Structure formats: C-alpha cells, structure tokens
Amino acid sequence: MQTYDFIIVGSGSAGSVLAERLSGSGRFSVLVLEAGGTDRRFYVQMPLGYGKTFFDPAVNWNYKAEPDPGLGNNADHWPRGKLLGGSSSINAMVFIRGAREDFDAWAAAGNPGWSYDDLLPAFKALEDNEAGADQWRGVGGPLHITDCSNAVHPLTKRYLAAAQQAGLPFNPDFNGATQEGVGVYQITTKNGRRMSAARAFLRPAMKRNNVSVETNALATKILFEGKRAVGVEYEQNGERKIVRAGREVILSGGSINSPQLLQLSGVGPSALLSSLDIPVVHANDNVGANLQDHVGVNYTFKGKLPTLNQILRPWWGKLLVGMQYILMRSGPLSLSMNNAGGFFRTDPSMARPNMQLYFQAFSTVIPKSGERPILTPDPWPGFSIGLSNCRPSSRGEIMIRSRNPSDYPRITANAYSTNADVDEMLAAVKFVRKIAATPAMAEIIEEEVLPGPSVTSDADLIQDFRKRSGTVYHPVSTCRMGPDAARAVVDPRLRVHGLEGLRVIDASIFPDNITGNTNAASILTGWKGAELVLEDQK
C-alpha cells in the first residue's frame, strides 16, 4: 500500500493550489485524487466554451437541487467541475476577491489570521494582474488576471453610463480600495485562454517528481485509526484502491463533495449516519449544514442597437468569431459573457454593498433545452442586466441520501426563505429598472422582454423573481470554519474539530459568504491553507 505525506481529495480551485504549495520545497510527497478527467479540452480552454461545458457530463457533475418552494418549486441545475481545475475550469472566470468587511467579519468571529489585512499579501502574491501592481494588486504570481477594459462590447459603455446616471460611481477596480460602483470585470484568462487553477498551479506542480495525480479516481471513504485520518479509499476504473497519508488527508472537493465524503466516512450528523447504518466516527451536526449561496435573476431587453446576438447566432457569425479566436485568441470567445457589472446597496445605511450587477451584451429568452443559452442567442438585438444577492440570510444543507458514494447528495438550497432576502431582492430589481430608465439606456431600449412591462406590483415582481431566479454557482459554508466545535466543522487552522490528521481546505470552510464571485477566495483559501499546513509540520 502506497504512502504519501499528503493526500489531497479534489483538484479544484483550492486543491490545485495546495498541490503546488505543499510540493514546492521537495520535502513532501503529494497525491491528488480527482474524480474527473483531464482539462485539456478545447471548450475548457476557450473562455466562452463554458456554454458547452455547462451540461457536459464529461466535465461536470451536473447536480440538481431539490425542488425549492422559494424558487417556485423549480429544481435548480447546479453545475460543478468534474475535471482537473474543478469549477475553475468551467466557470465564468470573473475575478472578485470579496469585500474587506467580509474577511474582517471572519476574523472577528474568532478566526485569527483571516482578516483582510492578513490575507491581502497572499492575494497579491498569487496573482499576476494585467492592470499592474499597486497597493492592492500583485504582479508576477502564478494566476494571470486579464484587464478587459478595451475588449468589451461597445454596448458596455452605455451600461456603465446608465448605472452612473442611476447614482453609482464608476469603479475601475472592484478589488481595489473599495468595491461599490460599476465597472468592467477582470477575468482569469491569459492570451485568450482560460486561466484555471489547474493551469496556474496544478500543471506546474505535476512536473515535479514528488507530485502524483490520479484522475477518474472517486474518493469513497476517509480511513481512520481511532480519531486520526490515516488514508483514503477510492474507486478507479471499477477497482477499489487504498492509499495512506503519512501526515494529513486534506479534503478540497468543494462545498458539495467535501461534506459528502465526511458523511460517507462517518463524520457528520449522528442521526443521519445512524439512519444509513454508517458507523459514527465523529458526530457533528454542522457537516453539510449552513449552506449559503448567491441567487440571481436577469432582466432582459430588446435593443435598438446591435448586440452579440447578431454575431453569435448566424452560422457566418459563428464562423467569424471562431476564426478570430483560433487565429488571434481574441474576440467574444476569449471573454466572459459578463463583460461588466457592479456592486450596490439596497439600503444606504448598510456598511457595504449587498447586491451584485452583471451586464451581458446578448440575450437568451428562447434557449434550447439541455444547452446553456449562450450558444443560441435570440434572433433580435437583446441584452441583459442581471443581479444576485451577496450575503443572503437563507440557509440550506447538503446531506447524503445513502451509503453509496456514487449517489448524489440531497441539495436543499432554501432560496429566499427569509423575508430579508425577499425584501432586498425586491428593492434590487427596482434598481435594475431605474438603470434601464436612465437616458443612456432608455434611448436604445425598444422594450423590456423579461419580466415585461405588465409586471409592476410588488407581489408580481416577487412572484417573477421567485419563478425565474436560480443559483449563480457560489455555494459555501457546508464545512464552515470557527473556533467553537458546536457551531463549526473546522477550526481557524482548517483542522476538522475532534479529529487528527484531517483538514478541509476549500470554499466549504467560509464562515459566511462573500460579496461577489467566490473563485478568487477559493484559490486564496488553498494558498492560506497551504501556509497553515506547512507551519504545522514538525
């Protein structure tokens, strides 16, 4: 039976960073177990290819949440990356760190070392930002971040002007001094190719002799001797295999897979485990609980000026942008659909923004079934202004259904299950209409298509956003960090409470969700987690 110093389960945003950082000195051997396969696929590397990977079972877990009363009983599609790089290989690439206050709140809750000032040096060290270095920004790090200011669709400038007319300041850098305002999103790409965590961190690490990566390797159980994790059982090509960890087992499967593997291994709510005849290694009701996610909705308009619809819909347009991408690594296929966005407060008394905006110079009111709408835009010039909540108070859970590791867990999102979440979204959609009514926007809008001008009363607006909202793919907190074992899964050093030789290092440890997209903070968690692991090695 082979032994490695560290076994990392999952090669996603955090796991890829861990593999690189823990192996860097050459002192330790590292094994990465990835349930999916390679990231060397055209539609993974091409930024806009995430339209193709959105439902592709070859690279995507394709989870489905339970029917949600808060979403008009819709059962939401939850894509998660099942390949090297994890969800960073199939996401929309927007790079947002989160607000200073988010991380300061983590530290204030009893997690020393996790304040914004503590984390800023790590954020700067891991990035290579095309916009250049400053007080907030880093260059020369492994993760290249592209400044898209000069590449976005011309309609984006209209959106930026309209949002400013609606009262928001222009913000050239959402990861700079302040987050509030509107601006162009920076994205994780380099030279027109996706800059996933696998490309930035894991691929360089795989060149080292002390790093092994096993793909198509589904971790099925953490092995314990008493209260100490000593190895992992996994399935690969129909065969059951066991590997031992000389130092630590580290779970980096993300907010769905990490709690699932803990529960399958006997770490979780004792009532659930007992009901499934899983021997309890360590009882903790927080494993899989406290699920938080961002939920969003689009308002879609028919325009009087050309949008990306006119290029991406016809065959000749597809050919044109395809050639532009293949020959020049530029054009719409080299970008995210979210060209620009912003952050605002629905209540001026709030200390930080609670809503995020997205601008998309295309529309997909008539999508094909089983396909991400990006691939078939509408036959008329359309665009969307989207938004999502940043720190909703609704809480859900992720719990296993059976002892079978191949059975998907039950995802209960409980979206809009608090009055506060409903009230702030109501205020937010009204603000989207305020942006659309400004002179800069109103003069190019022919009509509001979704939800449409007939939807005006508060009751109708609420019914509409319940019916049309969905996850924006930022689940966190299912193995939350905290000093109190009665309320958390891991301690501030990301060690699982009550157990030895076992850590969780991924977005599931966030004590609370952050203001914005979660990938940057997931990568940061891998970087910070690696520092903690290395500090603790004797």
Image: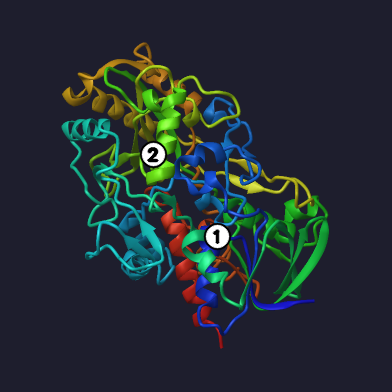
User: Could one spot residue 225 in this view of the protein?
Assistant: yes
The kind of residue tagged 2 is Gln
Numbered marks: total: 2
Q: Would you name the residue on which mark 1 appears?
A: 487
Q: Dots 2 and 1: beta carbons under 8 Å?
A: no
Mark 1 neighbour density, 10 Å: few (under 14) some (14–19) many (20 or more): some
Q: Nearer the viewer, residue 4 or 148?
A: 148
SS assignment at label 2: helix
Spot the residue most to the bottom.
538
Give the residue displayed 33% in from the left and 64% down from the top. Answer: 116
The kind of residue tagged 1 is Arg
Spot the residue most to the top.
454
Q: Nearer the viewer, residue 97 or 267?
A: 97
Tell me where residue 208 appears, x and y as whole percent: 57, 76
Q: Would you name the residue on which mark 2 appears?
A: 324
SS assignment at label 1: loop
Tell me where residue 351 appears, x and y as whole percent: 26, 49
Q: Quadrant of residue 359?
A: top left
Q: Is residue 93 above or below residue 309?
A: below
User: Could one spot residue 336 in this view of the protein?
Assistant: no
Tell me where residue 497 appears, x and y as whole percent: 60, 69
Give the residue displayed 55% in from the left and 84% down from the top. Answer: 537
Residue 347, numbered label: none
Mark closer to the observer (2, 1): 2
Q: Is residue 302 above or below residue 529?
A: above
